[in-house]
Image (cartoon, rainbow, N blue to C red):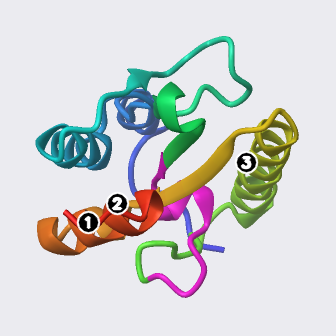
Amino acid sequence: MSADIVSPTHRSKIMSMIRGKNTQPEMAVRSVCHEMGLRYRLHRKDLIGKPDLVFPKHRLCIFVHGCFWHRHTDCKYAYTPKSRQDFWLPKLAKNVERDKNAQEALKNDGWRVAIIWECQTKNRELLRTEIQKIFKLNI
């Protein structure tokens, strides 16, 4: 196992800057949805998992997941850290389990759930196509 190349204090500062809301991928999804005339609510605390975008009219929740943090299968951004795997592997596995439980609970409450991955937000036209598929729109 290789040692971390930065001090614990610096690593803590780096990690504290990682945001959970209003991330660049989330903002891209919000922008495209707004362009398409889709109106939504953000981070509804009354719904399990606090979905990133909620479309009450469509009974739809969209989660915008970071490929690394939520373990996007076969994605180059979902790499596994080489150091401190005893820390990272359980942490990342808990994220996946929490996601699964939240999605299941929302579906049981009558919501449709969609995931948009960080890597899907890199190309605006592909993102638009993905959102159209989610809503089954021909805009």
- Which mark is on residue 131? 2
Q: Is residue 4 above or below residue 29?
A: below
Magenta range: 64-75
Q: Residue at x 28, y 38 (%)?
A: 38
Callout 1–callout 2 Cβ contact below 8 Å: yes
Q: Is residue 71 left or right of residue 110?
A: left
Q: Residue at x 50, y 45 (%)?
A: 62
Q: Is residue 118 left or right of residue 51?
A: left
Q: Residue furthest front?
A: 138
Q: Is 73 colored magenta in this rendering? A: yes
Q: Residues within 10 Å of mark 2 (few under 14, many from 20)?
A: some
Instruction: Decide which of 131, 98 is in the foreground and name it.
Output: 131
Q: Secondary structure at mark 3?
A: helix
Q: CA distance from mark 3 to mark 2?
A: 20 Å
Callout 1–callout 3 Cβ contact below 8 Å: no
Q: Earlier in the sequence, mark 1 or mark 3?
A: 3
Callout 3–callout 2 Cβ contact below 8 Å: no
Residue 139 image point, x, y percent: 19, 63
Q: Residue at x 73, y 48 (%)?
A: 99
Mark 1 or 3, closer to the camera: 1
Residue 21 image point, x, y percent: 40, 28
Q: Secondary structure at mark 2?
A: helix
Query: What's under tag 3, amino acid-wise?
Result: Asp
